Amino acid sequence: MKPRILVVGSLNMDLRLSLTRMPAAGETCLGRDYAYIPGGKGANQAVAAARLGGQVFFCGRRGEDCNGRILEEGLRAEGVDTACLTADPAAPTGLAVIPVEEGGQNRIIVLPGANMRVEEADLRDALWQPCDGVICQLEIPLETVFALHAMTRERGIPLIVDAGPAMSLPLDRLRGVEVISPNETETQAMTGLSVGDDRSALEAAQRIQSRAQARFVVLKLGGRGALLYGEGVERFYPAYPVQAVDTTAAGDAFTAALTLRYLETGDMETAVEWAGLAGALAVTKEGAQPSLPTSAELEAFRRSKV
Ligand code: RIB
């Protein structure tokens, strides 16, 4: 049986700018090209989970505009159920501007629009259908995230919180969450610790765990891999070396694969391995949703690494 996953979160149209280098403050520089690409952390995670074999439902809000329609159709074409995606006349669809420089490093500016109007009532409708796990991120109002935490706990459904984008998060409001997974900048924003080496990463994970009482903390450490902390396990996973083209949505591929594999097997250690493979593959292609791997691609990549 395919795990049934509800993703509550954002969808954005990404305006991807391809640059040789980022301009300095006050500088004008000529870029190479640009493209509009479906993105948004929530939608990316929904598409990734569907491509990897999950049965996925999406809950969120889009504007009543052209971008919103394109993004919704894109989700449906991937097999994601959009019955709980609301077209909201009061705000435009989310937009992200993503300059990417040579070597794949990006910066992301999000104009959230309708994503910031997702509220508790939306969750009630979405949680009406049975599901095995729920994923969310922080591109919707935090109060909605906290309400989701309370509602999933009440129903005994594991909640996986992808802690992006970076912000100072009151972790006590997520007390008892199943999984919390920040990247390096998100970890720093949450704990005040810069995680430049294994020792500081471990200290940050311990700090997050003690504040949120999470079952598992999974730190995404970019080119250094990942750290799993919780339930007596403390394990660093090296990154899979790949030719980086664009890091956009690598974290989303990671979270989706982590969730799917964890729900399938109940084994978080294997889930982090799979997540690392998915994240590495996403880095090898341009853009958000076009870079997310299928289960066949992931399996082939995994075999090439053993
Ligand atoms: O994680 C990558 C995503 O962050 C992009 O697709 C962008 O839309 C922002 O939400």
Image (cartoon, rainbow, N blue to C red):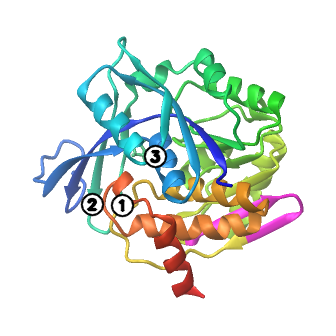
User: 211 or 289, which is in the foreground?
Assistant: 289
The residues tagged by marks 3 and 2 sit, at their Cα atoms, a distance apart of 32 Å
The residues tagged by marks 1 and 3 sit, at their Cα atoms, a distance apart of 30 Å
Q: Position of residue 285 (x, y in %)?
A: 34, 65
Q: Which residues are magenta?
A: 224-235
The image quadrant that residue 245 belongs to is bottom left
Q: Please say if the residues under marks 3 and 2 sit with CB atoms less than 8 Å apart.
A: no
In the picture of the structure, the residue carrying the numbered disc 1 is 105
The residues tagged by marks 2 and 1 sit, at their Cα atoms, a distance apart of 6 Å
| The magenta stretch spans residue 93 | no
Query: Tag 3 or tag 1, which sits nearer the N-term?
Result: 3
What kind of residue is marked 1?
Gln
Q: In the rendered image of this protein, does residue 122 appear above or below residue 257?
A: above
The tag on residue 101 is: 2
Q: Who's the residue at 33% across and 44% down the image?
A: 38
| The magenta stretch spans residue 229 | yes
Q: Please say if the residues under marks 1 and 3 sit with CB atoms less than 8 Å apart.
A: no
Q: Farthest residue toward the right?
A: 232
**How many numbered markers are drawn?**
3
What kind of residue is marked 2?
Glu
In the picture of the structure, the residue carrying the numbered disc 3 is 79
Q: Position of residue 179 (x, y in %)?
A: 73, 48
What kind of residue is marked 3?
Gly
Q: Please say if the residues under marks 2 and 1 sit with CB atoms less than 8 Å apart.
A: yes
Q: Is mark 1 within 8 Å of ligand 1?
A: no
Horizontal placement of 50 versus 103: left or right?
right
Q: Is mark 2 within 8 Å of ligand 1?
A: no
Q: Is residue 183 visible?
A: no
